[in-house]
């Protein structure tokens, strides 16, 4: 029985598309549902075009009541009998309670070489620091923001003249390779980091 994966998005969902397309053939997982916290996320139509069920759990009606939002989110996950969660461009911070309820079964992709540059604006920060390289990381989600064990990383060179946009585009291309590779490894039951180039 293949593992059921929920992919949580807030926007374009390019990582979601890469993940969905990777879960075919002898892959031990399948995309069960794509959930967005924003009704207008372009990724919702992209998921539907790929034949994946979608759901919206709009966070706005809940205001600051994150627990109430997550109660509905969990109900949606349970409805789809989800085994694993992949957050991919999901812009809501999840509470410790939610994460602990899914710990060991929830992955995230972050556009930096963790533990460097946790949080937002990673490319601008790498450029500001004069770094010669950056990259992306897939990690297990723990209560510490972007702090969980890293399961895979890819390095990306920073080139003269790079802007935040040109760098983000170059890193995103590698995200689309790394995340599917880590998910396949993880869905097979491995929790050790993959060597990926
Ligand atoms: C990507 O940079 C990803 O690393 C970050 O959100 C951005 C957009 O991802 N988490 P996507 O195109 O919505 O998958």
Image (cartoon, rainbow, N blue to C red):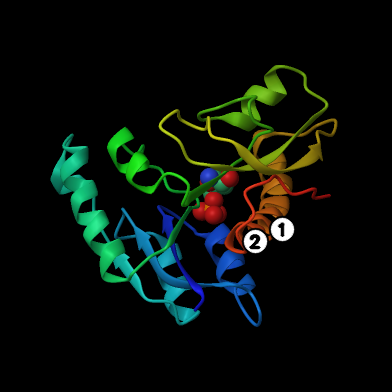
Q: Residue furthest top?
A: 129
The residue labelled by disc 1 is: 177
Q: CA distance from mark 2 to mark 1?
A: 6 Å
The structure residue drawn at horizontal position 42% and vertical position 55%, both measured from the top left corner, is 9
The answer to whether marks 2 and 1 mark residues whose Cβ atoms lie closer than 8 Å is yes
Crowding at label 2, few (<14), some or many (≥20) Cα neighbours within 10 Å? many
> Residue sitting at 30 percent across and 42 percent down?
98
Dot 2 lies on which element? helix
Q: Residues within 10 Å of mark 1 (few under 14, many from 20)?
A: some
* Image coords of residue 140 (percent x, y): 53, 43
Residue sitting at x 28%, y 37%: 97
Q: Position of residue 3 (x, y in %)?
A: 49, 70
Where's residue 178, x and y in %?
A: 70, 53
Q: From the top left corner, tell me how far across and down residue 169 is, in percent.
A: 68, 48
| Closer-to-camera residue (41/174) | 174
Closer to the camera in the image, 96 or 174? 96
The answer to whether residue 48 is left or right of residue 80 is right
Left or right: 187 as drawn, with respect to 12: right
Q: Is residue 104 left or right of residue 165?
A: left
User: Which of these two is toward me, 88 or 79?
Assistant: 79
SS type, badge 1: helix
**Viewer-side label of 2, 1:** 2
Question: Where 76 sits versus 173, above or below?
Answer: below
Asked which quadrant contains residue 125, the reply is top right
Residue at 67% across, 41% down: 136
Tell me the residue that label 2 is attached to.
180
Residue 55 disc label: none
């Amino acid at each position: 029985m293949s593992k059921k994966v929920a992919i949580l998005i807030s926007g374009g969902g390019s990582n979601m598309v890469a993940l969905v397309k990777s879960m075919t053939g002898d892959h031990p997982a399948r995309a069960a549902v794509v959930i967005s916290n924003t009704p207008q996320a372009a990724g919702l139509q992209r998921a539907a075009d790929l034949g994946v069920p979608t759901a919206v759990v709009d966070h706005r009606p809940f205001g600051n009541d994150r627990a109430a939002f997550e109660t509905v989110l969990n109900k949606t996950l349970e409805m789809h009998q989800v085994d694993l969660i992949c957050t991919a461009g999901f812009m809501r911070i999840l509470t410790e309670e939610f994460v602990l309820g899914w710990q060991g079964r929830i992955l995230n992709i972050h556009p930096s070489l963790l533990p460097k540059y946790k949080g937002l604006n990673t490319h601008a920060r790498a450029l500001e620091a004069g770094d010669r390289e950056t990259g992306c990381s897939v990690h297990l989600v723990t209560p510490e923001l972007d702090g969980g064990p890293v399961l895979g990383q890819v390095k990306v060179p920073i080139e003269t003249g790079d802007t935040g946009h040109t760098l983000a585009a170059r890193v995103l291309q590698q995200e689309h390779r790394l995340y599917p590779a880590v998910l396949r490894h993880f869905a097979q039951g491995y929790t050790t980091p993959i060597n990926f180039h």
